Image (tube, helix red, strand yellow):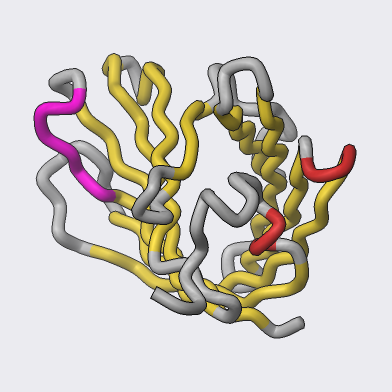
Amino acid sequence: MEGVYSPAMDNNFDWFVGTWTSKQRRLREVLAGSHDWYEFPGTHRSWSVMDGVGNFDEATFPTLGLAGVTLRLYDKSHDEWSLYWASSRTGLLTLPPVVGRFGDDGRGVFTSDEVYEGTPIRCRYVWSDITATTARWQQAFSTDQGTTWETNWVAEFSRTG
């Protein structure tokens, strides 16, 4: 499909370089069976580092008084990316990173095993619907090793520059 990201093109985050706005949606209560979402806008600035082996982006969520950064690093020997997130709330990188790659379908799937508020979880990020001007990202948690997932954060991106 023309205009959709393909790993055959580059298997990196070059498509995200530039500036974007986003419509963000998050569950008010995670892992509680909630269906109550809230929405807020985001602005994003992304750039490539180390000749595409790294990618960095800064996100600002003005209505929440919150900002964050993502550092993405490509491990050539394993053909996979490690994605680290830091929020202005703590200033700390999340560890472990979510790790994965883009598939032949153009979707990027990245996972990690973590603990969320005392509960062991598997965390999953999915990048999808990637075109030259749009992209979708979502975060989901699983408490049963990936058998079932609760999506708790969704972002719809639109390129501005």
* Residue that protrudes farthest toward the right in the picture: 50
Which residues fall within the magenta stretch? 146-151
Q: Nearer the viewer, residue 89 or 131?
A: 131
- Residue 93 horizontal/vertical position (percent): 68, 28
| Left or right, 127 with reference to 95 | left
Q: Nearer the viewer, residue 22 or 26?
A: 22
Q: Is residue 148 magenta?
A: yes
The tally of labels here is: 0
* Residue at x-position 51% and y-position 63%: 5
**Quadrant of the snapshot with the N terminus:** bottom left
* Residue that protrudes farthest toward the front in the picture: 8
* Residue at x-position 66% and y-position 74%: 20
Quadrant hosting residue 65: bottom right
* Residue at x-position 20% and y-position 62%: 36
17 versus 12 height, above or below = below
Q: Main secondary structure of the magenta part?
A: loop
| Left or right, 100 with reference to 16 | left
134 versus 155 height, above or below = below
| Left or right, 113 with reference to 91 | left
- Residue 57 horizontal/vertical position (percent): 73, 53
Q: Is residue 137 magenta?
A: no
151 versus 122 height, above or below = below
| Left or right, 51 with reference to 92 | right
- Residue 150 horizontal/vertical position (percent): 19, 43
* Residue at x-position 70% and y-position 28%: 92
